[in-house]
Amino acid sequence: MKTLIQNIGINETYMQVLFAFTLAFVASVVLIPLVIRFSNKFQLVDKPNERKVHKSPIPTLGGIAILIGALLTYFIVDNNYSSNIIVCIIASISLFIMGIADDLFDISAKLRLVIQFIAGYLIYWSGIGITSFYGVLGIYELPALVSLGLNILFISAIMNAYNLIDGIDGLAGGLGAIGFIVSGILLLGNGDFTFAILAFSFAGSIAGFLIFNFNPAKIFMGDTGSIIIGFNLAICLIRMINVNESNVFISQNQAILLSLGILFIPVFDMFRVFIGRMVAGTSPMKADKSHIHHYLLKNGMSHKQSSLILYLANICILIAVVFLNQLSINTSIIVIISGGFGISILFVGIELRKEQKATKELITNYKSSISYNKLIMKI
């Protein structure tokens, strides 16, 4: 393939990236209908219930096409089979199997977490890990055990954040695609060609999936897809943060801020929901309809509108993060976290106001009913 690209006369690196995105897109578009037919034939579908927003059974194994499309593309486009990329692929396949088991048999949360921790450990063992804070909060190099624990928690948190944000048509896939495209561009700029190809392969595969997942959805990605997206995006972001300082395209501090921008919506939503559930006295793992996309649906937005609004919000956050680069890294992080808390307070305030208004209307209606009954009795 390299010879063909060289004969065309266009920059080889850019052509390979474009080819990776396009091939993964086509592979996903071809595979998805096959997965839909297979799922429908064997009733491997997600059935509606009181918590879910879809009204009819939908095939739920779209993650199969996303992973196969991305990995098939990677092996065709890049011939780098280094130990860390092989470990990433093995861990992805392990999580893929876990995701299918969870989609079909609903495995326990504890077992899922153990498998996720093992996958995170394997990535650290392969040499991909956050080993320094690069001056954030005045912290630089991390002790080995702290670095190991941080990496396992980081990777697990990102997997679960994308799993939890996958509540309406097109949302998790669209946010994941934006994350892979941005990280892919930055990895490419920093000379990390192997993981740039991996990022664009996933971006293309997700883009093909979104054709069938955007409202009205013909298929869901399921836990298989959301966990695979979160896992591989976390790896790409770690690689992006551990940039070679001799390359001036992007510094470690800029990479950290952009990573926060990419992850802001799913991670912020996960922590907001967990804290809200604990304040309410329920388990943080108990499913409900308190996610940001549920809030948008409750306020009259459609699936499509809600997803597009959150795509736009993600892009705006990334643009804002670029401007925050003018500030110190610690000040920038404080601004981002403060913004998250501010949005949380706004959401809570709006919800409380709506509840107060509903309560007031209920009391008014009750009083009117009593007055009417007394009038009837007098007559």
Image: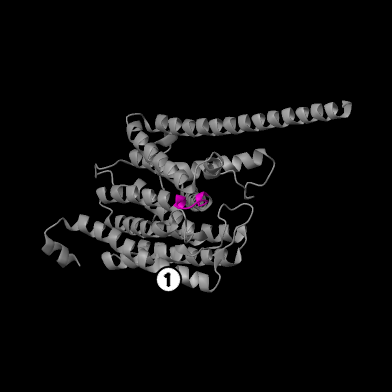
In the image, 258 versus 172, the foreground residue is 172
Query: What span is in magenta?
Result: 165-172
Asked if residue 240 can be seen in this view, the reply is yes
Where, by quadrant of the figure, is residue 209 drawn? bottom left
Label 1: element kind: helix
Q: Report which residue position mark 1 lands on.
A: 34
The residue under label 1 is which amino acid type? Leu
Asked if residue 124 can be seen in this view, the reply is no
Q: How is the image coloured?
A: one colour
Q: Judge left or right: residue 313 versus residue 190.
A: right
Q: x, y percentage for residue 347?
A: 55, 34
> Is residue 132 located in the magenta-colored stretch of the structure?
no
Q: Judge left or right: residue 136 versus residue 6.
A: right
Q: x, y percentage for residue 348?
A: 59, 33
> Is residue 166 located in the magenta-colored stretch of the structure?
yes
Q: In which quadrant of the rendered image does the N terminus lie?
A: bottom left
Q: x, y percentage for residue 263?
A: 44, 44
Q: x, y percentage for residue 53?
A: 56, 52
